Amino acid sequence: MQGDDLRPLSLVKAARELLIPGSDIEAIERVATRLKDVEISGLANLKPLNVQIIANITSDYLCDYVRLMFVRSGFAATVQPGHYGGLVRDLLGEVDLNASPGNAAVVMFTHRDIQYPPPLGIDAKEARELVNREVTFWTSLLERSKIPTVVVSFDLPPRRMLDEQDGLTPGGLGWHVRMTNLEIATRLSSTTSLIDAEALQYRVGATQWYDERLYHLCKQPYTMEALPEIAHTIVAAMTGLLGGGRKVLVLDLDNTLWGGVVGDDGLQTLELGSETAEGEAFVAFQSYVRDLSRRGIVLAVCSKNREEVARAPFREHSGMVLKEEDISCFVANFQDKATNLRHIARALNLGLDSFVFVDDNPVERELIRAELPEVLVVELPDEPAYYERAVEASKAFPLRSLTREDLGRVASYRAIAAVQEASSSATDMDQFLRGLSPVAHVEKIDGSTVDRVVQLIRKTNQFKLNLTSFQEAEILEAAGDIIALRLVDRLQDYGIVAVAVAKPVERALRILNWVMSCRVFGRRLENVMLDMLCEHAQSRQCDTLEAGYTPTEKNVILPEILCRLGFETADASDVYHRSVHPLSGEPHYMSIIDRRIKHE
Amino acid sequence: MSELTRAEIQSDLQEIFRRIFNNEDLVLSDSTTSAEIPGWDSLQQIKIILACEKKLNIRLRARDINALENMGEMIDHLIAAVNKASRK
């Protein structure tokens, strides 16, 4: 057994070092097979997760790849293959789908599972009715799952009885499948994420998607070659659902955003613009990056250049799509990039595990892989025209649904970097905070805010009392006992960034959970929240606050904050108490606008 | 395509088995049966056959895949398939 204890860790390393896409399927399969036989929980900061696959098909082969992709996403997952033919039975209760931390499910539909295929020759009205029945059948089953669930929608069937019309007109099976998927997508709970099977299918390619022989042999409908992409897609969606998606794209400049080396070649000779094919490719890549930033991905630059030289193209080159204001953190110097990435992480107040690194230089990529294994390093091809594909294929930025906060996030990180800079130089913190003219809005909990509240509680890691999360319906039901704060200052609107759920239990107001986004650390918004909680307690005839803290790897900052806010704990227990008097005391300089009050 | 010898196919198979069963010490003989190798079930059988098809650039029919009882038989089938493919 000598040396065996090292093997699981080296397998985790091997899993992370695979290039997906890039490595050949046999190399991927080898690591996936070996991972099956080792215990990896507790290693390399991998978070434990139990994943149950629910499907009519054989998912055993797929499970190995799913487990592998989870390791690459930071999870030590046990992945249970579904019971063959058990799709409906498992959803009906054979599998425990009740909320329970660390459990998740993957439901896989295929066109063979369609319950109401349209008979040949039916009219459009009947065809629509069949779609309704199909959708009701499946959504009523999906609703039973209270745990994070990724659903692979129905793939397009290869048999097209209506030929080219099959997917386009009522009565075709392809049309029925498409309409069903679209409709299911509108009826999902906040803990469910739907994969567009048709898009997955065309990425994989039709000839690599179906394998009828394999289906008849063992009931796996896909080719073996399709499995890594299917697994990667499922795991990316689940990672997004669990709040583990990456947030920052760090970009090199020379030969990454433009062709040529600005420090050597000068501004005018750079390949950038529609004059040349390569110049056009860099423009296209920049426009892709800009679109990512509009969607909430934070951009940072990390370049080995003098800063003025590095900034010159942003200011003076007409071919630039990206502007200086798109970059939340701009670092150009001659330090090693690992050191610079750590600096960027501090400036943005985000973990390196939310970083994606894009650099044309293989040496820099190797350095970051070796020094900062938590950073996802994209393997860029030589051809800049394919950069976008490479970043896209990394699936680093899963998105479940676009929120207003996603759209405003970039401005907010730019503001954080500014705040960090100002606060390190400001001699008087109070003066600085006051200068921001902050306003805290106490938001009403309704259909327009509930998504964000659920998302914030789920995604916050650092300022988070415990792991309790809530469904949309629970939040709406408890609306009167929820305080949601939006922060606005002269720099920007941060959106809802702090939420507390607190219910009276006899004479104590029990804080079931309290979260605050790391984007507003240092702004004393927690003091505002404390005052709100004290007020709420009094209105509910309570005279103490009670907060149950559950330590995790990431929320270690809380005990200190709670103590600073006047909470006390007896015998080092994790339940903190505080009287509702006095209020926080520390000046926060915020004006408060209560949007829960109706203005006549 | 040049004629493959039994020994060559056996060595290819051994490499495939070692990979699939994650066991570098595995040694195959003509009489090895699925009962002797832990984990050799019908799902692994399919993986083995698909790997052979890829390695030897052949396609077997579904009915042949399930009919293979022992290693000797498997090698016979593979040789026949390789010869058939090379005649085309």
Image (cartoon, coloured by chain):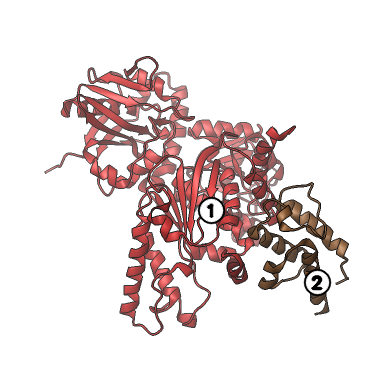
Chain colours: A red, B brown
Q: Which residue is mark 2?
A: B82
- The reply, left or right, for residue A482 in relation to residue B70 is left
Q: Position of residue A169 (x, y in %)?
A: 40, 78
Q: CA distance from mark 1 to mark 2?
A: 35 Å
Q: Which residue is mark 1?
A: A81
Picture quadrant where residue A225 is located: bottom right
On screen, residue A337 above or below B32: above
Q: Position of residue A488 (x, y in %)?
A: 32, 36
Mark 2 surroundings within 10 Å by alpha-carbon count, few (fewer than 14), some (14 through 19), many (20 or more):
many
Mark 1 surroundings within 10 Å by alpha-carbon count, few (fewer than 14), some (14 through 19), many (20 or more):
many
Picture quadrant where residue A124 is located: bottom left
Query: Which sits in the foreground, A34 or A507?
Result: A34
Q: Position of residue A390 (x, y in %)?
A: 61, 54
Chain for disc number 1: A
On screen, residue B12 above or below A600: below
Q: Position of residue A231 (x, y in %)?
A: 56, 54
